[in-house]
Amino acid sequence: MQTIANQFGIHKALKVLGVNSINEGTSTGSQKFSNGDLIDSFSPVDGQLIGQVKATTKADFDVVMEKATSAFKTWRTLPAPQRGEIVRQFGDKLREKKEALGKLVSYEMGKSYQEGLGEVQEMIDICDFAVGLSRQLHGLTMHSERPGHRMYEQYHPLGVVGIISAFNFPVAVWAWNTALAWICGDVCIWKPSEKTPLCGIACQNIAAEVFAENNLPEGISSLINGDYKVGEFMTKDTRIPLISATGSTRMGKIVAQEVAGRLGKSLLELGGNNAIIVTPDADIKMTVIGAVFGAVGTCGQRCTSTRRLIIHESVYDTVKTAIVDAYKQLRIGNPLDENNHVGPLIDTDAVNMYKNALDKVVEAGGKIIVAGAVLEGEGYESGCYVKPAIAEGKPDFEIIQHETFAPVLYLLKYSGGVENAIEIQNQVAQGLSSAIMTNNLREAEHFLSVQGSDCGIANVNIGTSGAEIGGAFGGEKDTGGGRESGSDAWKVYMRRQTNTINYTTELPLAQGIKFDL
């Protein structure tokens, strides 16, 4: 019987990406070395071992830091448009290897192949964005109160940027950070999730190829691998002025405290507990499409996944029936097979978390209206496939107040005006993504107003899941407050400097102070 890896060309993809059966998990470019223990990468698709990665030791990390700090001295002196040209070449390499990298993302993480391709496309898009931005790293010019003086501000690169990414977007989030950091003149050290280390190896191979072709020094892009202890090498290192960390709120608080303790900067993209408000004026068909994809896409493992559906009582039964009917059409299975809608959870720990959430909502007095289950039998041998579930509950249930990284959707009922729905939405600790489905202009504008959604992302008539790279991505409260990708997110990767030039033969002091000698 042909294996999934053979059937869908996984071995060919690994070869294209330069990923072997045993990989050095530490790299400063073409130089690869590791002296730590082996990390196994199993696919949640079929439970098979894809490959092994050697973890980074402290001694390995010190070599990485030496290479990175040395490379920064060269990289920062290149004009920003020249750095943009390197990023353009990196984007072109991604275009060439999009299919192979998309397959690896799908097989190692478990998201659908189309989502894997979409994630690589996000990498390409952020490269295009960064190339244009490399000619637009603007400062301001201000009028001085002193005659014959000019004031302006400019931005300089920070130095070494440390990136810690999560398993659910194993390549795109790294690229969001790296493409911008590179054009800003920074060098990057990346620790990918230990659950998806081969995706990190593949991306580093592509980057190293570009830098080598341009005779640029080792260390502009570096890779380290391992668990949280390896991440601590970066968070505790005073030579790394910025740590960008994506993951759980619990993890983010630890990173924030550690980095703040040494007065470093942190960019945090943490948990989400995202809701769609459905008003009496909502388009039900659009609502169902947005809610279902938001809840089951990536098997509910997006930080922007829809967790809560807050529905007005007048349309509650109609929406409930439509959502339940839609769930009956979901096909669950191998995510590389494009006939399927839902792939596996990342591992059996995630499966246990999923089951625990369903137990807790029932214990709190809720009702399961689309039963969940762990799927068994042919095609489900990994033990990571589950049925997306829907539960009815009340907003103050403890389990509903927390993020469950799995396909569990809670239906909540509201009455009265839209302000009541917004209050329910905002009462959770997280503040990443939010949406309202309505054709009522007043409701939409109220949702977007200062009295409306408290999230970093607020959408009208689209779901919570998915974001364009042109806009800044991130959220408030327990989501961490960080912003990545578009808009002026580039500024976090740079230090601001205010400059004053006196082009006279006098030295007047500010505020008219007299100090005659």
Image (spheres, grey):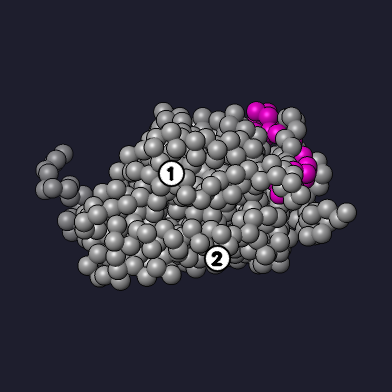
Q: Considering the numbered disc 1 on the image, is that residue within a helix, a strand or a loop? A: strand
Compared with 323, 439 (above or below) is below
Quadrant (top left, top right, bottom left, bottom right) of the N terminus: bottom right
Q: Residue 357 appears at what percent x and percent y? A: 49, 38
Residue at x 43%, y 70% (from the top left corner): 285
149 sits to left or right of 81: left
Q: Does the magenta stretch include residue 49?
A: yes
In this image, 388 relative to 315: left or right? right
Looking at the rendered image, the disc whose residue lies closer to the viewer, 1 or 2, is 1
Q: Where does residue 397 sit, x and y in percent of width and height?
A: 36, 38
Instruction: Note whether 93 is above or below 243 in the view shown.
Output: below
Q: Mark 2 points at which residue?
A: 125
Of label 1 and label 2, which has the lower sequence position?
2
> Which residue: 29% across, 65% down?
280
The amino acid type found where label 2 is placed reads: Asp
Expressed as whole percent of the image width and height from the top left, the position of residue 253 reads: 43, 33
Q: Find disc 1 in the rendering and name its residue.
A: 367
Instruction: Count neighbours of disc 2 (C-alpha within 10 A) and say few if under 14, some if 14 to 19, many if 20 or more.
Output: some
Residue 361 appears in view:
yes
Total numbered circles: 2
Disc 1 and disc 2: Cα gap in Å?
Answer: 42 Å
- Viewer can see residue 463: no
Q: Nearer the viewer, residue 502 or 157?
A: 157
Query: Which contiguous range is marked in magenta?
Result: 43-63
Q: Check disc 1: other Cα within 10 Å, few if <14, some if 14-19, many if 20+.
A: some
Q: In which quarter of the image is the C terminus?
A: top left
Q: What residue type is labelled 1?
A: Lys
The structure residue drawn at horizontal position 59% and vertical position 29%, both measured from the top left corner, is 229
Residue 459: % across, % down: 37, 62
Residue situated in front as seen by the camera: 312 or 233: 312
